[in-house]
Amino acid sequence: MTEQPAGTARLTIDPDFTLGTVDPRLYGTFVEHMGRCVYTGIHEPAHAEADEHGFRSDVAGLVRELGTGLVRYPGGNFVSGYHWEDGIGPAEDRPRRIDLAWRSIETNQVGTDEFLGWARRQDLEPMMAVNLGTRGIDAARALVEYCNVPGGTAWSDLRIKNGTRDPHGVRLWCLGNEMDGPWQTGHTTATQYGQLAAQAGKAMRQVDPSIELVACGSSNAEMATFGEWEREVLHQTYDEVDYLSLHAYYEEKDGDRASFLASGARMDAYIANVVATADHVRAVRRSRKRMLLSFDEWNVWYQSRFPGERALPLEETPRLIEDTYSVTDAAVVGSLLMTLLRHADRVAIACLAQLVNVIGPIRAEPGGPSWRQTTFHPFALTARYARGTVLRTEVSGPVVETRRHGPVQALDTATTLDEETGALTVLAVNRDQQENLGLRAALRGFGSRYRVVEHLVIADSDPDAANTEAQPDRVTPRPVPDTRVTGEDELEAVLPPVSWSVIRLEPES
Ligand code: AHR
């Protein structure tokens, strides 16, 4: 029997209160040449589970199960020193280079053709980044030609000679990475970056007019140049680009778990500020175009534990930022996904950074097993079930006091409606660390009665519980039996402390 909640959060779910459509690109991820994301992550020719291309089929299976449909590549900071030409042609001829971003040795055994071939076999849309750090317009437009032109030109014929007859057809392109960050190779000013991005973007589009372009916003909302960077970059690029990027990583600091659990509030404010800045530029330019956002790096990352790249020994395939995630981290990841969904009217692309090993939802040991981290589950279940239209819901109920964000609702939630099937998905996080939270959602205006199909929860008596190689299934989604729709058409559920839930409903036939 479920323990009775100390408080109850109330909301109304009405199909007429719509926020936006869920773009499947919101469920993107990110593969960077960093640490063990590529080598011994997705790719390990000597592994017993390697396929004929040298990619791990056990990891490939988990990537499928994760439900991501889009993957960004090859960086990240890595891209700002990358010569993409090093990664094409016969593997034995490829140079070993120093990757400045992570002070690692890059063997170039996986490059553009291998990665895009893997993405295609995995049914993943690729999102490629070009190097605007040490390179520029020419290398960028040559890469688009290599990837997207069918043949009959020098770069496209080279792709064919290298074994890929059909064009890769990459639609989404990032114009550099975090160019506002002093750590970035080629770090520059907003004006210089904006001018270069506009020119590179123009040349890339002259090669392939069908591509979509993402300009770099700030590396995070705490950058001293935040806001002004976005304004100036958009001023320079507004007519050339389709999206502006956002990046954010969250972690628990100074034992302040309440603020950490409310990280969604921080992400929410960040998105609202970027939208306001983009709309300011739009107004000043009298433009009809509404800039969309690409939140192409987000996650929980215990960044304060990273010693910094200069402290790293120069190695091949080092273990970098292989954070092990807890139940609390899973609740935060689930909550960040809800925040993204609630901004579906402006955030069209989002990438959980990264996919495997490097702050990834999937872990893989060299020559060993692979497993799902706790954060895998909220991502996979949200990607599977939160489809269709996002509904606007207002919550009233118990609040949690936080040092960083002030009072926040104990319940964080988002609801989607699949208009074709009538399926409703209610996502919910209880941010309270001690008490169960009741959820009562009035279902209004649906014209038919609903029933609960399933309520799955991620929760544990130990909020620091994690999945490890020894215990890969310590934390998995559990069914909650008592969740129901009452005779008054109210969804009634109990959410344990520090938990993430998905509640699926469908119309009664
Ligand atoms: O995802 C790890 C790093 O975080 C990326 O390379 C960079 O873009 C960001 O700072």
Image: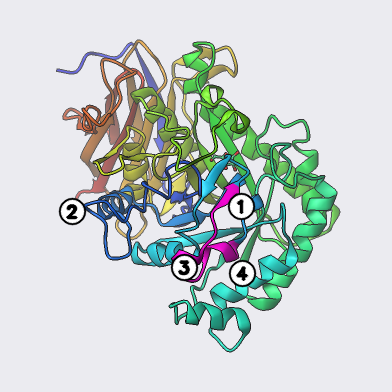
Query: Of the residues shown, which amino acid type is indicated by label 4?
Result: Leu
Looking at the picture, how far across and down is residue 503, in whole percent? 29, 37
Q: Residue at x 40, y 46 (%)?
A: 416
Which span is picked out in magenta?
84-98
Q: CA gap, disc 3 to disc 1?
A: 16 Å
User: Is the CB of mark 2 within 8 Å of ligand 1?
Assistant: no
Q: Is residue 210 magenta?
A: no
Q: CA gap, disc 3 to disc 4?
A: 11 Å
Query: Of the residues shown, which amino acid type is indicated by label 3?
Result: Asp
Mark 2 highlights which residue? Answer: 509
Judging depth in this view, the residue of 74 and 318 nearest the camera is: 318
Residue 347, placed above or below residue 491: below
Mark 1 highlights which residue? Answer: 79
Mark 4 highlights which residue? Answer: 143
Q: Determine whether the residue tagged by mark 1 lies in a helix, strand or loop.
A: helix
Mark 3 highlights which residue? Answer: 113
Residue 297, placed above or below residue 193: above
Looking at the picture, how far across and down is residue 407, in whole percent? 55, 16
Single out the mark in the foreground, 2 or 3: 3
Q: CA gap, disc 4 to disc 1?
A: 13 Å
Query: Of the residues shown, which amino acid type is indicated by label 1?
Result: Val
Query: Of the residues shown, which amino acid type is indicated by label 2?
Result: Ser
Q: Determine whether the residue tagged by mark 4 lies in a helix, strand or loop.
A: helix
* Label located before the other in sequence (1 or 2): 1
Contact, mark 2 vs mark 3 (Cβ under 8 Å)? no
Q: Is residue 154 left or right of residue 342?
A: right
User: Is the CB of mark 4 within 8 Å of ligand 1?
Assistant: no
Q: Residues within 10 Å of mark 1 (few under 14, many from 20)?
A: many
Residue 485 visible in this rendered orientation of the protein = no
* Label located before the other in sequence (2 or 3): 3
